[in-house]
Image (tube, rainbow, N blue to C red):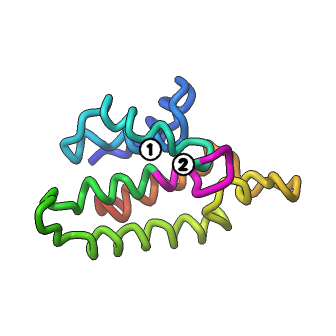
Amino acid sequence: MENRVEKTIERHKKGYNCAQAVVCTYCDLLNAEEQDAFRMSEGFGAGMGGMESTCGALSGAVMLAGLKCSDGNMETPKTKGSTYKLSKEIAKRFQETCGATVCREIKGVDTGKPKYDCADCIRTAASIVEEVLFGEE
């Protein structure tokens, strides 16, 4: 797989929110339609609630973990454990790099000292996606 990290930034510059930039860049590799991914991830930008919750870039990465792992069996789902394991690894790596997983904390809303800007969070999430979900080092 070719590195797509900068493609996430191109999407963000076009107006995609952080979650959309990440999930839409890789959804084709997981047999998902980009327009559906775009619509589904729209509410996850700006930290789900105006910087109050999980970073959108991280949310997008976790959505991709679900697309990769889920068996789609709605009668007797059996893949949650593997999806949770990947999601936990993604969140751990993101926390290690960005110093937080909550948008408000990353952006330094309360302290006035941002840890990272959106582009850096998007790049971090995309790099983690490529490593954890697609095995690119």
Q: Foreground: 128 or 84?
A: 84
Secondary element at image label 1: helix
| Residue at left offset 54%, top offset 36% | 17
In the image, which residues are magenta? 49-59
Residue type at the position of mark 2: Gly
Q: Nearer the viewer, mark 1 or mark 2?
A: 2
* First of labels 1, 2 by sequence position: 1
| Residue at left offset 20%, top offset 70% | 79
Res. 69 image quadrant: bottom left
Q: Which residue is mark 2?
A: 56
Q: Which residue is mark 1?
A: 22
Residue type at the position of mark 1: Val
The residue most toward the right is 112
Instruction: Find out whether the residues at labels 1 and 2 contact each other: C-beta distance under 8 Å.
Output: yes
- The number of callouts visible is 2
The residue most toward the front is 75
